[in-house]
Image (cartoon, coloured by chain):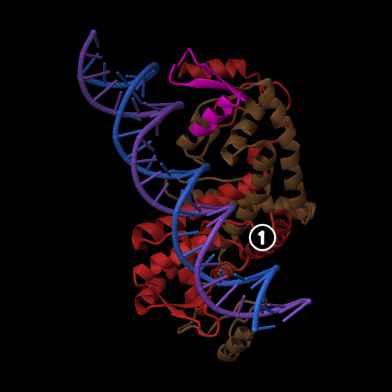
Chain colours: A brown, B red, C blue, D purple
Amino acid sequence: MQRIVLLVAKATIDGMMASGSAARKPTSEPLVVLEEFLPYRLNVLAGLTSSALAQIYAERFGLSIPAWRVIVTLGQHECRTARDMAPDGVMHKSTVSRAVAALEKRGLVTRRPNLDDRREEWLTLTSEGRAIYEAVAPEALAVGERLLSVLTPQEQKTLSTLIEKLTRQARLLAPRDAGEGEA
Amino acid sequence: MQRIVLLVAKATIDGMMASGSAARKPTSEPLVVLEEFLPYRLNVLAGLTSSALAQIYAERFGLSIPAWRVIVTLGQHECRTARDMAPDGVMHKSTVSRAVAALEKRGLVTRRPNLDDRREEWLTLTSEGRAIYEAVAPEALAVGERLLSVLTPQEQKTLSTLIEKLTRQARLLAPRDAGEGEA
DNA sequence: CACAATTCGTTGCATGAGCAACTAGATTAA
DNA sequence: TTAATCTAGTTGCTCATGCAACGAATTGTG
């Protein structure tokens, strides 16, 4: 790769990071260093963990991430209504709608009209749905554990606190409803 | 809303979280509590911050997130090649390709063939591109700052370390190339 | 030199997600 | 009662994204 050599020549001192990437001196000083930019780093991390999980959900159980979320939620508390599935506004209501439709078609979830408010419908896991839940959940947890395994218990607690604080703050900065979805 | 009343009656003790969501006792014990599941929390946080930023990128400058990343990268070091734009595999190469095409059409970026390896092309910000970079960057940074403002300097350092560790680990767990894109 | 293997980058295709418009049901007030 | 407002959820449309196949150029091997 004489390309690199050439570039190193051109690239006075500057960054020259290990990753084999080549760079030339910028015209003016960089204002943002992407790799140090918190939102970017958060997204990379979230993206990676999402991929790890999505692989399990999809390849082994044919579940999309929204579908997985619906299932977990129903495994936790048999609730209903698109909004309750996404307490904050994480996941668009149309996303939930479609995920539920797909799950129903696969026979993993049952709809039952709420007679007290017929706009809504109660959702429940079928026994088959629960079976899948019980199969996926441990694997998902395992990934979570493996991820956390590089942190001490103390660090894990700290992390939790920090995420909490940042999330609260992010909610203030983000457009009223926004959020979105994977993982 | 007598619905809630009804449900509270049915929902022995259980969760009954503040958010006005209603729940019924699950058939068996929940295996995963979504709100405590790290990958989920990371995604919510990343999603929120993405939204906050995307709003700026899009509404005020007509930039998608991949486009923004390309611009920042070029603002940092004038590099080229899809791979160098996404050092790790964050951002698919097709994503980068399309982002660059769009930026070129808007006259924010210039392509110049690399004569030493004609598969590649050098990318540079045009002066107009740089102008946008210099306009967006401070705003993006400001969002980052406002986000971090809820943490003490010490906490910020800790956070950085934790993200670093987790990211390294996540890379091991995720499918070889995976990653993806927003922020 | 020729042939396989790799790499950069683009593009067609299919899928997934958000938006917005809409239906249906519920709630409030006149 | 009736009309206006609001909420739950669905669906058509559009667009972004990932994948996979491809073309072009380069590198490595026999």
Q: Quadrant of residue B152?
A: bottom right
Task: Look at 68% across and 36% down and name the residue there.
Answer: A61
Give the number of marks: 1
D22, D1: nearer the viewer: D22
Magenta region includes residue B113: no
Task: Look at 48% across and 68% down and name the residue there.
Answer: B70
Horizontal and vertical percent position of residue B41: 62, 46
Q: Quadrant of the C terminus of chain A?
A: top right
Whether residue B144 is visible, yes or no, is no
Task: Look at 57% across and 66% down and name the residue there.
Answer: B86
Q: Is residue B38 above or below residue C25?
A: below
Q: Is residue B13 above or below residue A89?
A: above
For this view, does B41 lie left or right of residue B125? right
Q: Is residue A39 above or below residue B28?
A: below
- Give the class, few, some or many, for how many residues have Cα within 10 Å of label 1's Cα (few <14, many ≥20): some
Q: What segment is highlighted magenta in the picture?
A: A98-123
Whether residue B55 is visible, yes or no, is yes
Q: Quadrant of residue A133?
A: top right
Which of the chains bears the disc numbered 1?
B
Horizontal and vertical percent position of residue B37: 67, 43
